[in-house]
Image (tube, helix red, strand yellow):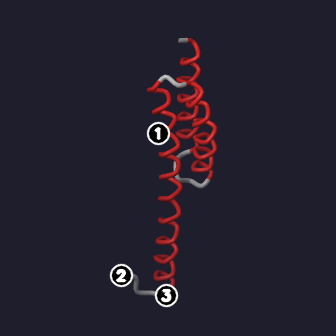
Amino acid sequence: MANTKSAKKAARQIARRTVINKARRSRMRTATRKVEEAIAAGDQARALAAMAEAEPALVRAAQKGIVHRNAANRKVSRLATRIAKLAKK
């Protein structure tokens, strides 16, 4: 347990940020999963709608430091490519 006043404050701040970060990470993963499910079902319209929700969630998570910027960009790119492939089928 924290001994000093500043360590106690830091512990409170970390606990507060952890809750916020978990919510953002969950929102990002849920949005990504919706895109994945639409792609698996072969429904391009639903995949595009889900992607419109997932891309901002991924970018925001990267801006807030929850995931690395390159990881978020890579995920967006790979999802977009898979959605584009649905159109060619």
* Residue 8 x %, y %: 46, 83
Q: Residues within 10 Å of mark 2 (few under 14, many from 20)?
A: few
Kindly identify which residue carries mark 3. 5
Q: Residue reaching furthest top?
A: 89
Q: Secondary structure at mark 1?
A: helix
Marks 3 and 1, how far apart at CA: 42 Å
Kindly identify which residue carries mark 2. 1
The amino acid type of the residue labelled 3 equals: Lys
Marks 2 and 3, how far apart at CA: 11 Å
For residue 22, which numbered disc appears in the image? none
Q: Residue reaching furthest left?
A: 1
Q: Quadrant of the N terminus?
A: bottom left
The amino acid type of the residue labelled 2 equals: Met
* Residue 53 x %, y %: 61, 42
> With respect to residue 36, does 18 lie above or below?
below
Q: Secondary structure at mark 2?
A: loop
Kindly identify which residue carries mark 1. 33
The amino acid type of the residue labelled 1 equals: Arg
Q: Secondary structure at mark 3?
A: helix
